[in-house]
Image (tube, rainbow, N blue to C red):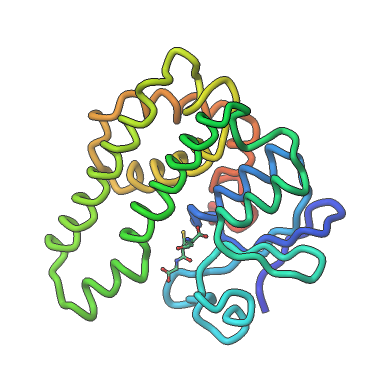
Amino acid sequence: MFFRIWVRFMTYRLYNSHANSAGRRVRIALHLKDIPFEYVSIDIAPPAEEHLGEEFGKINPMRLIPALEHDGNVLIESMAILDYLEDLHPEPSLYPADPLKKAQAKAFAMTVAAGMHPLHNMRVIKYLGQELALDQKAVAKWYVTWADKGLHALETLVSENREEGPYCFGANPSVADLFLVPQYANYQNLGLNLTLYPHLAVIVEACAAHPAFIKAAPENQPDFPGDG
Ligand SMILES: N[C@@H](CCC(=O)N[C@@H](CS)C(=O)NCC(=O)O)C(=O)O
């Protein structure tokens, strides 16, 4: 049975964990739109690996978090979840109003979601070490190689919009910021050299001061490990 925390009255139930970067994208959106939700903590770290069990397999057959339950339906994939929330709760929007900027913000988010995050996922890193028997140095090289390529692309993608900041694509947070912040945090936590990406650093700093991003941060989640 998963560990459940009730937050106000709600019809949304988010399966995630404090350390779940894809889930953090959804948490930020829920807080931005001020949508109450039930927090269901799924421990994906060994030895628990709750996401690999039968019970969670019924929620997401890919056995990845997050998943969002709403009115008896379960949604998976953070981008699809965000679009669903955007349709039901259009304000404030997760996209810039200008169609070109909207496409750019989505492309930025997809670069993280499709081009970077899957290469660094826990199951992939585990597979490289355990199944392909790569040593720690080789696995680290894999990780850093794809992180650097992705970060270079992200830095370039935002570089033309800086005068409009403080966020990736203008004065309001968009999907681009929702995908950037958790991914950047993963790299920070692993001690990657991020000095080559000054625009990203400034954007992440601006997001860190925004209430929705603060509420969605790992340390502010009910399953964040305490002192005792
Ligand atoms: N494309 C998915 C990615 C979900 C995902 O990979 N979640 C990670 C945690 S951030 C996970 O569940 N990993 C478990 C594993 O690798 O076994 C989304 O955007 O929702």
Number of callouts:
0
Nearest the eye: 168 or 41: 168
Q: Hey, which residue is sitting farthest bottom in the picture?
A: 54
- Give left or right: position of 71 versus 141: right
- Give left or right: position of 80 versus 125: right
Whole-percent x and y of residue 143?
A: 23, 55
> What quarter of the picture does the N terminus occupy?
bottom right
Dividing the picture into quadrants, the one containing residue 95 is top right
> What quarter of the picture does the C terminus occupy?
bottom right
- Give left or right: position of 129 versus 157: left
Residue occupying the point 49% across, 80% down: 52
Q: Is residue 209 above or below residue 21?
A: above
Residue occupying the point 57% across, 34% down: 174
Q: Is residue 220 above or below residue 59?
A: above
Q: Hey, which residue is sitting farthest front in the picture?
A: 99
Q: Is residue 106 above or below residue 221?
A: above
Residue occupying the point 64% across, 43% down: 29
Residue occupying the point 56% across, 31% down: 99
- Give left or right: position of 49 versus 140: right
Q: Hey, which residue is sitting farthest right in the picture?
A: 9
Nearest the eye: 194 or 224: 194
Nearest the eye: 1 or 59: 59
Whole-percent x and y of residue 43?
A: 53, 69
Whole-percent x and y of residue 89?
A: 77, 43
Q: Is residue 187 above or below residue 211?
A: below
Whole-percent x and y of residue 153?
A: 29, 38
